[in-house]
Image (cartoon, rainbow, N blue to C red):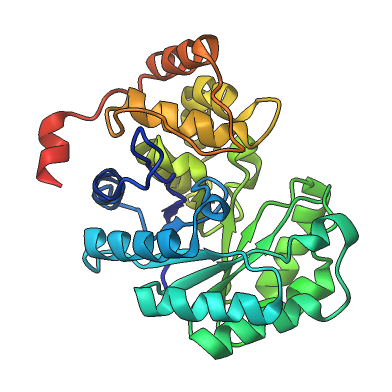
Amino acid sequence: MDLRGLSPAPVTAFTRDGDVDHEANARLARWLVSVKGVKSLVILGHAGEGTFLTEDERLALIRTYVEAVDGAVPIIAGITGEGTKVAAEEAKKCKAAGATGALVYPNHGWLRFGYQKGAPQSRYKAIWEESGLQCILFQYPDATKASYDLDTQLDIATQEGVVATKNGVRNMKRWYVEIPELKKANPNLQILSCHDEWLLPTMFDVDGLLVGYGNIAPELLVKLIEAGKAQNYTEARKVFEQLLPITRTVYHRGSHMEGTVALKLGLVKRGILDHATIREPLKNLGEKAEKEIFDAFDAAGVGRIQEAVLAAE
């Protein structure tokens, strides 16, 4: 997979009754891949409420996305199963449904208890060998016990089937030390930042972005990536400043989970979704937050997608 660009992590659209809305999800997929510079769509992750869906819903959503993009970009599925065997079986089913890649989440028990040495490596190996899905190493924030040390990252990054890393360590001391070491160990490893709330400091070291933010402002994020690759700080700063009102209202919130709700509201503002229905345990943000988010899009000059554009996708 060539992920050197923008890989949005789409939300999952629901009907007002709470069922997966396949028509709305297909519309979102078609619009995102129409943006030049979008390299993949990564579904069933945190932004997509992936762990809030049943297995049947997850597999059906993969099929919807695969059909909607019609080969334009690979569809990457979040693999979240707890046990290694469970995760490998999950990956096999996602591959059969049409996925090309796997964003491999850590065993979520590790968030609380930490991981044993070698266990993450085995997880990636099993997923690749059982499914053939190209794997993305997912580095969690430094504040969690599921954030891999450098040796673990290096082991995974040099395993067969691992093509990229989605790094969200959110500790720039580690970023500046570990990213060069990963590049040295595997020069072909694609470095993707997922620091939605503070992208600018990471833009000059990466091949692309894998972000929920890609739902709502893909056009500007593509420009940000281009500026970063050109080492053009002035232009990158300009895009960053334009996006800042949106960044603040979507991601500078009390909980990062609120970002998913805010993303859906942003898609309503842009005319992609008709409403921002979510699933528990997410909660609506309220009318005040909705107005703040809508006003932020106006302040950033990020407008509604024209009906004619959507109809053409």
Give the position of the N terminus as an image quadrant: bottom left
Image location of residue 193, percent across then percent down: 59, 52
Q: Nearer the viewer, residue 171 or 312?
A: 312
Residue at x 86% of width, y 55% of height? 112
Residue at x 64% of width, y 86% of height? 126
Farthest-out residue, front: 17
Residue 80 quadrant: bottom right
Residue at x 45% of width, y 56% of height? 43
Image location of residue 62, percent across then percent down: 37, 64
Q: Nearer the viewer, residue 222 or 302?
A: 302
Q: Is residue 13 left or right of residue 70?
A: right
Residue 310 quadrant: top left
Q: Please say whether residue 147 is visible from this viewpoint.
A: no
Residue 15 quadrant: top left
Label count reads 0
Q: Nearer the viewer, residue 297 or 228?
A: 297
Q: Is residue 71 left or right of residue 126?
A: left
Residue at x 54% of width, y 24% of height? 284
Image location of residue 205, percent across then percent down: 61, 55
Image location of residue 177, percent across then percent down: 80, 59
Asked if residue 71 is positioned above or below residue 65 in the image, the reply reads below
